[in-house]
Image (cartoon, rainbow, N blue to C red):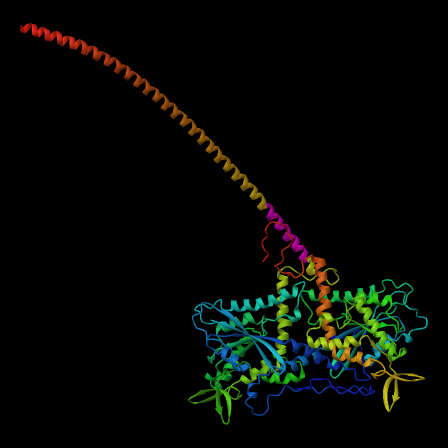
Amino acid sequence: MSKGLPETRTDAAMSELVPEPRPKPAVPMKPIGINPNLLGYIGIDTIIEQMRKKTMKTGFDFNIMVVGQSGLGKSTLVNTLFKSQVSRKASSWNREEKIPKTVEIKAIGHVIEEGGVKMKLTVIDTPGFGDQINNENCWEPIEKYINEQYEKFLKEEVNIARKKRIPDTRVHCCLYFISPTGHSLRPLDLEFMKHLSKVVNIIPVIAKADTMTLEEKSEFKQRVRKELEVNGIEFYPQKEFDEDLEDKTENDKIRESMPFAVVGSDKEYQVNGKRVLGRKTPWGIIEVENLNHCEFALLRDFVIRTHLQDLKEVTHNIHYETYRAKRLNDNGGLPPGEGLLGTVLPPVPATPCPTAE
Amino acid sequence: MEEQGLKQNEELRNLSLSGHVGFDSLPDQLVNKSTSQGFCFNILCVGETGIGKSTLMDTLFNTKFESDPATHNEPGVRLKARSYELQESNVRLKLTIVDTVGFGDQINKDDSYKPIVEYIDAQFEAYLQEELKIKRSLFNYHDTRIHACLYFIAPTGHSLKSLDLVTMKKLDSKVNIIPIIAKADTIAKNELHKFKSKIMSELVSNGVQIYQFPTDEETVAEINATMSVHLPFAVVGSTEEVKIGNKMAKARQYPWGVVQVENENHCDFVKLREMLIRVNMEDLREQTHTRHYELYRRCKLEEMGFKDTDPDSKPFSLQETYEAKRNEFLGELQKKEEEMRQMFVMRVKEKEAELKEAEKELHEKFDLLKRTHQEEKKKVEDKKKELEEEVNNFQKKKAAAQLLQSQAQQSGAQQTKKDKDKKNASFT
């Protein structure tokens, strides 16, 4: 059997070549050696390997949205997360390009591969969010976009002749960038998260965390968490979706350390003989992947290495289902929980109706 | 390689990573989720009674599934499903084995395939119903759809029976069929080869689509290709262990030798196990879901009148058609309701009329009776009067008679006195 866990590299983000793809496991071997116990081996556990092979062949989709006022470092962070230029940075804009008048939604897709795993990554940028003088309802275009993706998927699913693999453009994760004021959340932040935490997985991050000292950071985080709780905003991982005790303890730990205070960078510097991603300042080099300096590594591990699949599943099993149920309800006026084919009793009053079956 | 999701459009470009990101753990994340939930696998065994289905299942899964051997007296084919939970390392498998009881026993086997087809369809239907629900929970739905159908061919050595061909033809678009030759220890090696080729050519000439082991992925392509050559697998099942050399092995002991189940020279059991479980279990499940189930769903929905509208129409085609149907249905219901109401009203009227009639009759009867009663009464009264008159008359007559009598007596007495006097006078 192939190795179960991914190799844990040290945090040195060396500019190595794309690591060699994991050696493709051979067809699982029959038990070697004569051992009366092994005569009982059926081979059911090979299904794991079979499934892994299949999923590697089909590849994965992942759609991540970044929301926040301009200049908070969204594009840089995304580039740092995925170690490639997935996002065009604002600084590459023409000087003449104005900040958009309304919130725009820009989705850019790339294919990245690692260890034999192909991922179609789509980064959805929201330039113009929170940049106007009057920002009322600026979350609406974003909400609309998210719902449109659900709608697209639903339409495909409802078709008679369905595609073998429905293209998934639904937003799996929304990184919301909080400005590091050190005080508390802004009304815009609260409004946005209140509206959108119900339709998408929101992960709040504190941007440009290198402007805060350690004490300021932890105080700020506590205040933010408190405010979110008071306002009834459930960010990912949502408490209500913890499946079992194991999940709960693991997620509780994560929730306690959220929102992650991150610093992004795509420049490398030499520190102690190693090349690290960082920001150079007169008073020192801030290492992005150093847990003492900022929590970028936590965010990366959380989003990519442990909870990527879960993000997709919560989106599919919960947010999408909620949308679908609401949509079908509005459209057909059917009471929830009843089936479509043949077993629905339309609301005819009084006289007994024959069932349609 | 499946490129659908990864097709390059004008926006997509391949990026190279400048460091280790870590999403190569994705397959592991996915697999871990599935492992915690457990897997479902459902096998349907179709074959005559006594052909060795239960024994083979026991042998394949190294356990003794409880079941009593069936009799040959079943009036029809019925399906018996049994579920088990098996665990190996950290993998939990919910295994369901469906047996066809009574298959091939009847004198008239025309309808033998029907219960099987119905069962398979019923499982698809259940899944479809769940999928169409408004509030659904597909991610923890216990999947009962049949992933593999092992068709047991009797080891005649000649060819397929017509029942086999008919049944397989009915099943091939609904389930992954894997034909196997049962009780293969009754066929000699040289005959076996001929038998196998005869079977395969019959299947091809009759257009029966059996399950094709997938050859698109490099690691399994080779083994699948080599195994396909040996189809249909000639298997021998046994749960008894016989000592061979210095180890125990599953085998069947005959006076003339021992047939070892796991010896590839003796039978193809190992190949079947390899193909069914160790290499293609996931593919079987996937084919069931993406091919057979989709086909069923498509046919079912089209049957119900749903059609895909063209892609730029806004609302759901399904929902619209459903609305239309619902209104139609409602209209029909209302019509029926009206009819029923009218009929009810009519009946009520009739009943009322009847009742009125009856009432009238009763009244009349009553009147009649009254009249009769009065008449009788009058008659009686008249008679009474008559009687009284008569009595009066009688009394009068009696009084008169008495008077007369007394008069007569008096005069008689006088007369007799006279007579006596006369007599006495005469005597003197």
Read off the magenta span.
B321-338
Residue A187 shown left or right of residue B36 in the figure: right
Instruction: Say which of B72 and B349 sits in front.
Output: B349
Q: Residue at point 46% right, 33% down?
A: B362
**Residue A307, quarter of picture:** bottom right
Would residue A303 be found to the left or right of residue A342 on screen? Answer: right
Q: Residue at x 69, y 84 (%)?
A: A4
Which is the main secondary structure of the residues drawn in magenta? helix
The answer to whether any part of residue A140 appears in the image is yes
- Percent across and percent down for residue A310 are 72, 75
Residue reaching furthest to the bottom: B246
Q: Residue B301's quadrant in the figure? A: bottom right
Q: Quadrant of the N terminus of chain A?
A: bottom right
Q: Is residue A338 depicted above or below A282 in this figure?
A: above
Q: Tell me, yes or no, if residue B1 can be seen here.
A: no
The residue sitting at 45% across, 87% down in the picture is B253
The spot of residue B21 in percent (x, y) is 79, 82
Q: Residue A287 versus residue B338: which sits nearer the camera?
A: A287
Observer-nearest residue: B128 or B423? B423
